Image: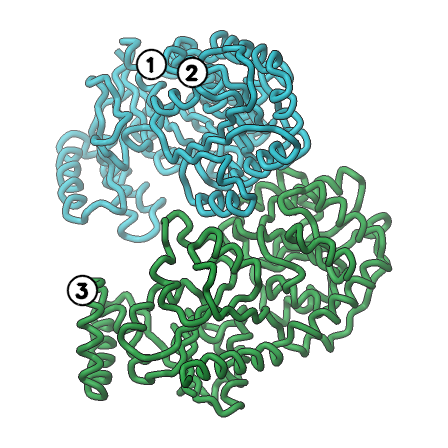
Chain colours: A green, B cyan
Amino acid sequence: MKVVIYIYHFPRFSETFIARKFLYLLQKGIDVHVVAWPSNEQHLFPEVQPYLKRVHYLHLTKNKIKAFFYLLYAFLKTFIKDPALTIKYFKITTPLYGITKALKKFYSEYPILLIKPDIIHFEYITIFKEHHHLKDILNFKAIASFRGHDVVYTGIDEKDYYKDVFSKLDAIHTIANYLVKYAKKYRGLPSNFSPIRKIPPAIPSDLLEIEKNYSTRNGVSEPVRILTVGRLHWAKGYEYILKALNILKDRGIKFHYRIIGEGPLKEMLVYLINFFDLEESVEMLGKLSFSETIEHYKWADIFIIGTLWGSLKEGFSNAVLEAQAMGLPVVAGEYTENMKYLQREKFAIPVERRNPEDIADKLQLLIENPAERKIIGMRAREFVKNYHTIDKQAEDFCRFYTEILGEVRK
Amino acid sequence: MHRIAILGINYPPSTFIKRKVEALSTSNKFQITIFSYRIDRHKDNTLSNPDIKIIKLLHPDDPVLWKVAVFIYYFIKISLKHPKILNTLAKTAMGKAIGFKSFLNLFGNYLIISSYSWDIMHFEWVMHAYSYIEVIQALNRSYTVSLRGRQITIEPLLSEDKKNRLSKILRNAQKIHSVSYALKKNAENMISEPLDIQVIYNGVDTELFNGKCDNSEHTYLNIIFIGSLIWRKSIDSALYIFYRFLSEGGKGTLHIVGNGPEKPRMLSTINNLNLNDNVVYHGEKTEKEVAEILRDMDVLILTSFAEGLANVILEAMATCTVPIATNVQGNPEAITHGENGFLFSPLSIKEPVSYLLKLYHNPDLLYRMKIKAREKVESMFTLEKMQEGHIKFFMEAIK
């Protein structure tokens, strides 16, 4: 089985699970390759280094002369190996995109023409949208992932953005069922599309081994420590958290809130922190390395995230799973249909999205009950251990690929 | 006739600047020259008075050859007319520019503004003045600025450098115009020394923005959100307030007018809250189209985190549309809570939802507030009042 993983940049810390999957598939004897743009976080993955010949980097340059030579190299290499395929490639892509764009596409796809894989896993549906014509050129099974923003809002203002895309896919991997529901309702995914495999997000299991000391801080004599890790982007709903903290402040509750992350909404956060008079209790720490972030997970009593979609029940984002693995009680939004389940299982605290009053109430409950924080934190750890470790995820992917190929052989 | 130069606005200007410039030019007291970085004469909203001069300034995105030609032309012109100031202009540009390209742009623009005759330079966007203070002083002239919103409410928070720049601009200005008392107070709190700030409210064309203040039986509310889809306007919370209004038994349609980077957020929130059947998205509209749409509306919902004094509140009130708006900066100067509209704290949910329900269940109250809203605009926010204010402002500044 020859598998290509197509991703934007590789390896990246925020996508550790992809590096782990790559290594796991190799371990299982699968001929796996990665096609990606380079990453500046390679040094964080020494375990990947011995296998870099399986990572086919595409070079990004604004220098037109350099770009010409990269392209010439790619063209000659592909043409010498398989002239018929190269000609077929341009016969199909030139009428679709014009020669300039076809050449650019060719450069970003030539490693695939050389590898001739059985399966290509496009790690975001948005990547497959850029390369779906490959299905008319090569014989392979196309799998694309639904991960969140790619389904919820990318290209949302363009009608039928994914129209031609779904019909060329052989299988979908989703991190959660709500994304499939959303795609069927709003993004044109055919209601009878199959197969769709849910393999939830996952984090390295070594986080489960880090000891967590639970504090008795209750917001009266000593401020409770609250943490968010996430990009400063509108999708994360930071404004609602800040408003909730403003409500808590008015209620006389002491807290210390730290935000780890960078992004386009920094200006909004600076303004709202000032507007809600939170300068003394809110810190913006910017982007930190993973090891530094771990120290802040240890520091915190509560983790909160304001993301406007996502499901605690199905395993929220990586940052949330990391916090849960470190034994932190998490406060986040949840879909109404999962609320009862979460209230029963108690491995996280669900809140109504965009509702600062509800967020403040739920935070207050946790702030005033250190014992409850410990119970929820410990259950969160169990939850991650049972359902969201990277090894389990890699195993599920391996099985998924085998099944998809099994269908081909039939 | 006094000569006013206005620098740093795009052409055609946004609606409220257009109203101001036209009001000044029709007074027959001033000759207006606009120095603009971007000019698009094909767009709507161009100025109707042909006596207003429009001069293109250099912009980093302009074609290089064009920039070189303009630069040489104005360089020769100044060399012949005022050779003594060339050195000052070049030195100032060198002090302000970051890199050679930026130096040429700035020097070029200094040459352009020095080539024309004007008595006073006005900056509609206060921060633009920073690059020109020394040049204006070298030309022995003075400048005025307008305080409008973001540049006074948000920018100074972002860095000490921005705060210092703003302080320098305000301290050196001949006179300062503010669109609200709230912004005036903001500026006064920032600078310890006394500033000459005059509040002149923006005016509304009450002929164009003129709705029916009817008291017909309402079975639903027509609610409108108007504004750029940017974080400051918080379209997401407007949608959530509307969602809660519907969940609590209200009936109505939310109309959205505007465009911007948060459009994907708006569309995904409409999906996530299942509001597709209750929201009409109009996109970006011209002033006339906005006036037309407003005529059928009952309530304006404005969820902004920061506003100088939102023009859209004035336009809505003029059109008998009751504003429910955040109590930020200048908004309370137009809205008297409970009388001609409602105010709430940004990101609050319960209060704005309760106001919407109140108006939905009480058509008489809605009618009374519509009348009061229109009256307020007629008494305080007319074009005539604005014109009077600006004429007085510039006459005093030029003296």
Q: Is residue B85 visible?
A: no
Q: Is residue B146 visible?
A: yes
Neighbor class of circle 1 (other Cα within 10 Å; few <14, some 14-19, many 20+) is some
Are discs 1 and 3 located on one and the same chain? Answer: no
Q: Nearer the viewer, residue B304 or A343?
A: A343
**Quadrant into which the N terminus of chain B falls:** top left
Q: CA distance from mark 1 to mark 3?
A: 55 Å
Are discs 2 and 3 located on one and the same chain? Answer: no
Q: Nearer the viewer, mark 1 or mark 3?
A: 3
* Residues under numbered marks 2 and 1 in contact, where contact means CB atoms less than 8 Å apart: yes
Identify the image quadrant of residue B88: top left
Circle 3 sits on which residue? A95
Rendered position, B86 above or below A288: above
Identify the image quadrant of residue A202: bottom right
Circle 1 sits on which residue? B23
Q: Nearer the viewer, mark 2 or mark 3?
A: 3
User: Position of A118 compared to A225: left or right?
Assistant: left
Neighbor class of circle 3 (other Cα within 10 Å; few <14, some 14-19, many 20+) is few
**Quadrant into which the C terminus of chain B falls:** top left
